[in-house]
Amino acid sequence: IGQPFLQYVVTRPLYSEDAFADEHEKIHRHHKTVLTKNGVCVNCSCDLKRAKNAALSLLPFIGWMRIYQLKEWLLSDIVSGVSTGLVAVLQGLAYSLLASLPPWYGLFTAFFPVIIYFFLGTSRHISVGAFPVLSLMVGAVVTRLVPDEGPPVNITGFEGLTSDEQRVMVAASVTFLMGIMQLAMGLLQVGFIVMYLSDTLVSGFTTAAAVHILVSQLKFVLGLVVPGLSGPLSIVYKIFVQIEKTNVCDLVTSILIMVVVFIVKEINDRYKAKLPVPIPIEVIMTVIACGVSYAFNFQEIYKVDVVGRIPSPMAPNMQIFGQTAVEAFPMAIVGFAVAFSVAKVYSVKHDYIIDGNQELIAFGASNIIGAAFKSFAASTALSRSAVQESTGGKTQIAGLLSALIVMVVTLAIGFLLEPLPKSVLGAVVIVNLKGMLMQIREVPYLWRRDRPDCLVWLGTCLASILLGLDLGLAVGLGMELLTVVFRAQFPRCSVLANITGTDIYKDRKDYMTIYEPEGVKIFRIPSPIFFANIDFFRGKLVEAVGFNPLRVLRKRNKALRTIRKLLKKGELQMTSKGLLLTSFGPIEESEDESNMEDLDQPTDFKDLPVQVNWNSELPANIQVPRVDVHSLILDFSAVSFLDISALKGLKAALKELIRVEVEVYIVACDAYILEKLHSCKFFDDEVKSSMFFLTLHDAMLHILEKHPVNSENTKVCEKV
């Protein structure tokens, strides 16, 4: 037995906006000004509660430390911290190669920023440190200012420093500037800026970055010295030019590492529900590779490039900000966008709130202080954050412990990693690119579902590969904004009709059982109306009604001038049948039409003995376009705002229609828009507030009452 259809019956008066306002008194709210809402009056007031909230906002760790469940969470945080710390050591070494720096500087990035984020960050699960895309962007700046071949850029602070020290200074400087930008954006409360980086854009950008990373690691995998990294195509060319110089030991080691790591990572993914902790295969293979390299003296016998000794931090130098400002800004945006996206995923999963502005402050401070100790740009690595969360990490205590593991390696047992071949690190980086490279599978889906988004993905990816990551990001952002502009500028307008027997109105092209009263058009605008799309809107409106009202008005006024002239000459007389032409002479054109403004005025029937029916046959072969529409309804239910240009254009369009005797009704208008229309003096003797109705059906019933049509459909429509 099927469930009976649910029905409802509503009996209420027919409401225009004016009638509804008269019958229902509205509460007048006092809108807060900038000073009272979020300005001087609020920020300068101070009490104990505000001071407490400010402290909790600036130091979020106080909040979760107060609810820390020692017995339930501590063991999980310890296990997670140790696991994450081991991965952080390996990734720190590997991602330093992407930044064109000596490997050990990645350990500084896995230590100092983590400590600062512990106090200032709002996410409890992300692992702070080097991120491959960000590292590659740092590397592009480093190799530009301190190239492999030729002298570095002329900067005073470079005097007396080795090439590696110069590169470290560049990386630290751009990181420091990036941190200042992030901190400034956080203090200015502009965390919303990340909303302009869609998932599609980030996916295309990171896929292109993965291609850059893959190509940049080939020189380590093959054991080649490739100078002048100026782009992916040139790198590939330079590698293949000297492919015969490949170090076989490096190549074999890399292939072996990649095969083993790939297989074990697939096992981790397949059996992650059964494994208490993912197998740390990268760490295991690194330890084995270190032992083999040391035992067989790879560095001396096989000329393998190894990690070498740990450097000590140096005092920062900030003389090169002017050379790195252009690159620092996209790095600040990318670093924050990636970190915030990952943090948001875990916050939703574990039911807590993250603050975008506080995250900017946290990462800004982390990068500023980290750069002072020669670490490079920090964000969050997706794989490392996944390890920290999947191994049971509950809070940033796990992150703090991972930093302690990195410190122990750096200060106590780092010498054991000195024989580690760089080809091993390159192999580990390449294997971990699988997730980013597999994002290319999104392209067929996007092409089928949303082609503008697909074009954004392809444009961002190709531009980032061919032009570089910074320019590629700018191109992608430009394309994304263009898609938004085009979607808003060229919306899909439609003509609606009534679903027979209901108060529901749908696109007349989509349904069979529809009712469209003769002489009535319902036009729906599905987007805001503003300066960029007001002309498009007016053009679509002309298409919907089937005539150009301004052209019709001018034709009518010209016809009136001709009729008046004929009446004055006696060639046209008034009879019981209407106007009758008495002369068959040639009809001259109407008087001078140089003043076109007169033709745009309302039709003036003064001095005429009869009202002209424009849809009937006119005398003297006067031709005027027919207007079969007597009522037009504009559905504003999807219009969220109007700007001043749109107000002027809309008013002009309404006046043109009214002047050709078309009654216009606007329905479902947002209260804010209606208030704005009143405040902007939108209404006058022609455009009146009485044309606004509460709902589409109210307006339709009003029209049917004013222009009755004998039809069963009409009766059904009126009875709903």
Image: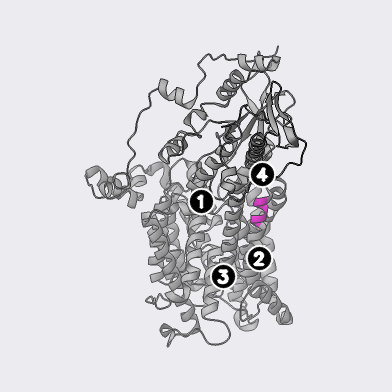
Measured from the top left, where is residue 656 in percent x and y? 58, 39
Nearer to us of marks 1 and 3 is 1
Label at residue 98: 3
Label at residue 195: 1
Was residue 456 drawn as part of the magenta stretch in this picture?
yes
Disc 3 or 4, which lies upstream in sequence? 3
Nearer to us of marks 3 and 4 is 4
Q: Amino acid at mark 2?
A: Ile
Q: Mark 2 highlights which residue?
A: 257
Disc 2 or 1, which lies upstream in sequence? 1
Quadrant hosting residue 604: top right
Q: Is residue 97 visible?
A: yes
Was residue 307 drawn as part of the magenta stretch in this picture?
no
**Left or right: 372 as drawn, with respect to 151:** left
Quarter containing the N terminus: top right
Magenta-colored segment: predominant secondary structure: helix
| SS at badge 4 | loop
Quadrant hosting residue 426: bottom right
Q: What distance separates the C-alpha of mark 3 from that of mark 2?
A: 19 Å
Disc 2 or 4, which lies upstream in sequence? 2
Q: Residues within 10 Å of mark 3 (few under 14, many from 20)?
A: many
Tell me whether the residue at label 1 lies in contact with that at label 3, contact meaning CB atoms closer than 8 angstroms.
no
Q: How many numbered marks have been drawn onto this rendered protein structure?
A: 4
Measured from the top left, where is residue 282 in percent x and y? 59, 61
Please determine whether, in this image, residue 160 is positioned above or below residue 613. below
Label at residue 590: 4
Nearer to us of marks 2 and 1 is 1
Which stretch appears magenta? 452-457
Q: Amino acid at mark 1?
A: Met
Please determine whether, in this image, residue 356 is positioned above or below residue 704. below
Q: Amino acid at mark 3?
A: Leu
